[in-house]
Amino acid sequence: MLKFSCDYMEGAHPEILRQLASINLEKNDGYGLDEYSHRAAGRLRELCNAPEAEVRFLVGGTQANAVVLDSILRFNEGVLAATTGHINVHEAGAIEACGHKVIPVDANNGKIDIESLERRLHLIKAECDVVGWEHYVVPRVLYISFPTEYGSLYTKDELKSLRALCDRYGLYLYADGARLGYGLASPDCDITLPELASLCDVFYLGGTKVGALFGEAVVVTNSSLSVPRGLIKQRGAMLAKGWLLGLQFDTLLSSATGKFEDTLYYSISRNAVAMAQRLGEGLIMKGYRKYLDSPTNQQFFIADNAVLPALSRVVAFDSFSAYDETHTVIRFCTSWATTQAQVDELLEQI
């Protein structure tokens, strides 16, 4: 069976496996204090044009979100997120388990509605100024996903507007980059990695879904913030054999020119996006109706419930949500490893 249900079904890029095999019997310092982790962190700072940034390598996306937010938020502070945001929907209350409330905000196709956010912040401030801030969960972080859970992208102007709102209301801006490569490699993306780094206080560059066996690289660009190693350890996000993370990101981020666009990470992300667009165009030609436009590696279509049993015998896909009583929104994901032959085989069989 063909499988297009998510973008983390394959192992790792072959070059990563080669590099891991080549150092397999080396003895390296643990907990991210090895030379490979140091080198990968240096590469990432260079690519972000953020020489003073703090870089931490964590084992997974949920851990990254929980650790980053717990490192920023005080006991009575919460995080604003789109109603569809990963921390609000798919992380089993990991943020709340750390003692911090997720405050949902209206979203359109996965993106926070900026006008709704501004109204929400204005009302919160007005009420707290009258009654007293000590009675409320105080918003302190704005969480966004780039790309969003719907495969959509914030434009540069939208990110600047969010940054301005954060500055006005004393918020930190944090970007979940689990699929960051697929966003930055999209032809529709009008922002660069250094620009993203300059607009966010913290973000992470995802590896689990973009070519690595596992792992995420957290980048803290705001010098007033830090993700303490002790907190990473306490939350179970610190890998004893930390060089396994460092070497993977060192391999993914190596660039002969020093440009992000010349890294393996960008190249394989671009492949995923190209295959997704090929798949999307083919599905339209087959008569499927788009649910929304996604310029990244996730494609959403509306399918008649009557055809789902037959379709599921051909391909594994994600049943995203109900559309109406007789139709379902289904999602197809490509990954860094998806080939044109796999896409064409799917289009031939359905």
Image (spheres, rainbow, N blue to C red):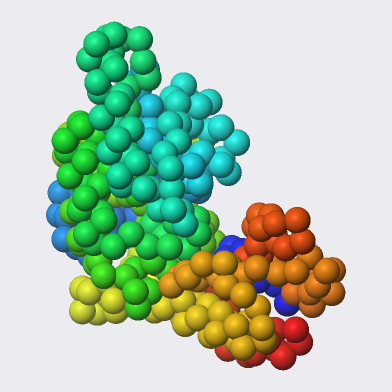
Left or right: residue 161 compared with residue 18 = left
* Image quadrant in which you'd find residue 339: bottom right
Residue 39 on image: x %, y %: 28, 60
Residue 228 on image: x %, y %: 32, 33
Classify 277 as above or below 178.
below
- Outermost residue on the front side: it is 325
Left or right: residue 263 compared with residue 270 = left
Q: Residue at coordinates 38% horizontally, 48% vertically from top-left?
A: 112
Q: Residue at coordinates 47% horizontally, 63% vertically from top-left?
A: 151
The one of 107 and 23 positioned closer to us in this rendering:
107
Name the quadrant of the N terminus: bottom right
Is residue 340 visible to us here? yes
Q: Residue at coordinates 71% horizontally, 69% vertically from top-left?
A: 303
Classify 343 as above or below 178.
below
* Image quadrant in which you'd find residue 181: bottom left
Badge count: 0
